[in-house]
C-alpha cells in the first residue's frame, strides 16, 4: 500500500469516527455496511463529507462497488489521480 | 433460504410498527365522502393527508367531463402511445399544459413517478452527470439508479454546496442536469430557486424543477415555485403531476428545448407502458382549466395552510420552515410518532405517518396536507385533536411538567 493510500485511509477513519454513535476499531478490511451498520443513506451522506475533505467528485455508482474502507480509499485515490 | 429472506429485517420492523396500533401502510377507507372527508372504521374522518390541494376530486365539472369521456371513449387505451396510438385527449392535454406554462413542448406520462423516472434517466446519458438534491423524492433517486450517467448529490437546499460540486465537475466534458423540487414533500420546505438558478447560469448546467407539490399552489397563476420567484426562463424542464392539485393521476414534463419530442421515442418509461385512460385525461384537462380560471382556490388553500401551520406551531409543535400546504410535525421518536398517528386516527383525523428512511435527517413525522376544500372549522378541529393527543402523550412542551 502506498503512503498516499495510507493517508487516505487515515483520513476516512478520522472522518468516520465523528459520525459513528459508538467508537469502533476500523481497519482497511472493515465492511462499511456490515461492520459499521451504515444504511445506504448514511453512506451517501458520508460520501459528501469525503468529497469535501478530498475536494473530489465521487459519483454514486462508484460507491455501489465499494465494500470495505480499503475499497473506498482506492476509489478516492483513483478519482483524485484523474483530477 | 427463500428468495424473500433478505427482507427478514424489514418484516420485523414492519410488524413492530403495526403492532403499536393500526398499520399505517394499509389504511383502508370504507368510503370517500368528499375531498375532505372519508369513512374509516365506520366513523366520519377528516382527510388531512391526501395532497388534494385544490379539492378538485369531486368537482362537478371534472366529474362530468370524466363521465363523458368514459362513455364516449371507453375505459382504457389498453396500450402505449407508440404502439396503440394516442387519443385526441392526450394531445389536447399536452397542448393545454404547454400553453399554461408558456412552453413549446409537453409530454404526458402515466404517473408523476414515471415522468421523473423517464425524463431524468433519458436526459442524462452515459457521458453526462446528474446532480441531485440529497433530499430528493424516491422517483428522482430511482431515475438516478436507472441513468447510465454519473450521479452526484449536493446538500439539501444549499446553493453554495451545489456550486462547489459543479465546480469540481467543471472539467468534465458532459452535460450536467441539476434536479430540485419546488416544494419538498416531507417537510413542505421550498427550494431557494433564485439562488439555484444563478448557480445554473454560472455553471452552464441544465435545470429541472419538479413542481409536483407546488403546481396550483405557488406563483401568480399557479405555475409553481419558478413562477413565484421569477426564474422560469432559467428552468429548462418542469416536471409535474396530475395526482395532486389536479385530483387525478398522471405526470408531465414541459420544455422549450428544441427537438424535445425526440424523447418520445427514447424514453422507456414513456414508451413501454399503457397511456392514461380517456376519463383521466378528461378530468385532468378540466381540472387544469379550473385551476387557471379560479385563483380563489389557491387563495383559500394558502389561507388554510397558514391557519393549520400557525395553529400547530402556536401549540408548541415543531413544524417545517414555511407555511405551505404540506405541514409536517416532527416528533422526538418513531414510537411516539406511531402512537400519535394512531391517536389521531382513532379521534377521526387521517394524515400520513412518515418515517426514516423516507424522511430527511431521520425525522419521525406526522405529515399533513391541506386542501382548499377544507373549511376553517375542519382545520380548527384538526388543531384541537393535535392538542388533545399531544397532551395525552406528553409531547407538548410545558404540559409535560404539568402532567408529572
Image (spheres, coloured by chain):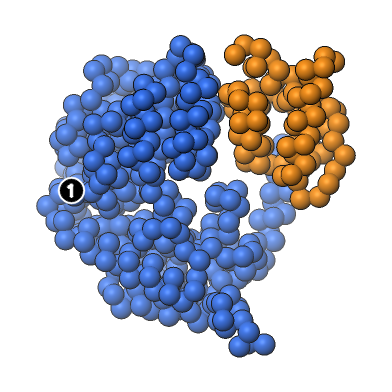
Count every numbered label the image shows and give the total. Answer: 1
Observer able to see residue B31: no
Q: Residue at x 79, y 27 (%)?
A: A9
In this view, the residue in front, B275 or B8, is B8
Q: B186 left or right of B271?
A: right
Residue nearer the viewer, B158 or B145:
B158
Please tell me whether residue A75 is drawn above or below residue B278 in the rendered image: above
Side of B341 where A38 appears, left or right: right
Residue B293 picture location, percent across and down: 12, 52
- Quarter occupied by the C terminus of chain B: bottom right
Label 1 resides on the chain identified as B
Q: Is residue B349 placed above or below B271 in the rendered structure?
A: below
Tell me which corner region of the image, top left, top right, bottom left or bottom right, holds residue B240.
top left
Task: Reply above or below: B216 against A68.
Answer: below
Q: Colour of chain B?
A: blue
Q: Say if B205 sits above or below B38 in the image.
A: above
Secondary structure under badge 1?
A: loop
| Residue B179 x, y percent position in the rendering | 41, 33
- Determine the residue positioned at 61% across, 88% down: B402
Q: Residue under circle 1?
A: B221
- Find residue B200 and report its image quarter: top left
The N terminus of chain B sits in image quarter:
top right
Q: Residue at x 57, y 83 (%)?
A: B399
Residue B92: give x, y in percent of width and height. Answer: 16, 34
B263, B227: nearer the viewer: B227
The chain drawn in orange is: A
Q: Residues within 10 Å of mark 1 (few under 14, many from 20)?
A: some
Q: Position of residue B174 (x, y in %)?
A: 45, 14
Q: Residue at x 27, y 51 (%)?
A: B218
Amino acid at each position: 500500500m502506498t503512503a498516499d493510500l495510507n493517508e487516505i485511509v487515515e483520513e476516512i477513519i478520522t472522518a468516520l469516527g465523528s459520525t459513528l454513535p459508538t467508537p469502533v476499531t476500523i481497519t482497511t478490511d472493515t465492511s462499511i455496511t456490515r461492520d459499521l451498520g451504515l444504511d445506504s443513506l448514511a453512506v451517501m451522506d458520508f460520501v459528501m463529507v469525503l468529497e469535501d475533505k478530498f475536494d473530489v467528485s465521487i459519483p454514486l455508482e462508484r460507491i455501489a462497488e465499494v465494500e470495505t474502507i480499503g475499497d473506498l480509499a482506492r476509489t478516492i485515490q483513483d478519482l483524485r489521480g484523474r483530477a | 433460504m427463500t428468495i424473500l429472506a433478505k427482507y427478514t429485517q424489514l418484516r420485523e420492523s414492519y410488524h413492530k410498527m403495526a403492532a403499536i396500533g393500526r398499520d399505517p401502510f394499509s389504511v383502508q377507507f370504507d368510503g370517500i365522502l368528499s375531498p375532505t372527508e372519508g369513512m374509516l372504521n365506520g366513523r366520519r374522518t377528516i382527510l388531512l393527508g391526501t395532497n388534494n390541494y385544490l379539492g378538485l376530486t369531486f368537482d362537478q365539472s371534472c366529474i362530468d367531463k370524466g363521465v363523458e369521456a368514459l362513455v364516449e371513449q371507453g375505459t382504457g387505451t389498453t396500450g402505449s402511445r407508440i404502439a396503440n396510438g394516442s387519443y385526441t385527449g392526450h394531445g389536447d392535454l399536452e397542448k393545454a399544459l404547454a400553453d399554461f406554462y408558456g412552453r413549446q413542448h409537453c409530454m404526458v406520462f402515466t404517473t408523476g413517478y414515471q415522468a421523473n423516472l423517464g425524463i431524468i434517466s433519458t436526459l442524462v446519458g452515459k457521458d453526462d452527470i446528474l446532480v441531485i438534491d440529497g433530499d430528493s423524492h424516491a422517483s428522482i433517486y430511482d431515475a438516478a439508479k436507472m441513468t447510465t450517467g454519473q450521479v452526484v448529490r449536493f446538500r439539501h437546499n444549499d446553493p453554495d454546496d451545489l456550486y462547489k460540486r459543479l465546480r469540481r465537475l467543471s472539467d468534465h466534458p458532459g452535460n450536467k442536469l441539476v434536479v430540485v423540487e419546488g416544494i419538498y414533500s416531507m417537510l413542505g420546505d421550498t427550494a431557494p430557486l433564485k439562488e439555484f438558478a444563478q448557480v445554473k447560469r454560472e455553471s452552464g448546467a441544465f435545470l429541472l424543477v419538479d413542481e409536483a407539490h407546488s403546481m396550483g399552489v405557488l406563483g401568480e397563476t399557479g405555475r409553481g415555485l419558478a413562477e413565484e420567484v421569477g426564474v422560469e426562463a432559467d428552468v429548462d424542464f418542469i416536471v409535474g403531476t396530475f395526482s395532486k392539485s389536479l385530483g387525478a393521476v398522471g405526470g408531465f414534463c414541459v420544455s422549450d428545448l428544441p427537438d424535445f419530442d425526440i424523447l418520445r421515442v427514447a424514453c422507456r418509461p414513456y414508451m413501454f407502458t399503457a397511456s392514461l385512460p380517456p376519463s383521466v385525461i378528461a378530468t385532468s384537462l378540466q381540472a387544469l382549466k379550473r385551476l387557471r380560471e379560479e385563483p380563489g382556490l389557491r387563495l383559500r388553500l394558502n389561507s388554510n395552510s397558514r391557519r393549520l401551520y400557525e395553529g400547530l406551531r402556536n401549540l408548541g409543535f415543531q413544524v417545517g420552515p414555511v407555511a405551505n400546504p404540506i405541514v409536517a410535525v416532527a416528533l422526538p421518536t418513531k414510537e411516539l410518532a406511531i402512537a400519535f398517528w394512531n391517536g389521531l386516527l382513532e379521534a377521526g383525523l387521517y394524515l400520513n405517518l412518515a418515517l426514516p428512511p423516507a424522511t430527511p435527517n431521520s425525522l419521525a413525522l406526522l405529515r399533513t396536507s391541506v386542501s382548499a376544500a377544507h373549511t376553517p372549522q375542519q382545520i380548527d378541529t384538526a388543531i384541537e385533536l393535535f392538542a388533545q393527543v399531544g397532551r395525552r402523550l406528553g409531547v407538548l412542551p410545558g404540559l409535560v411538567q404539568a402532567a408529572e
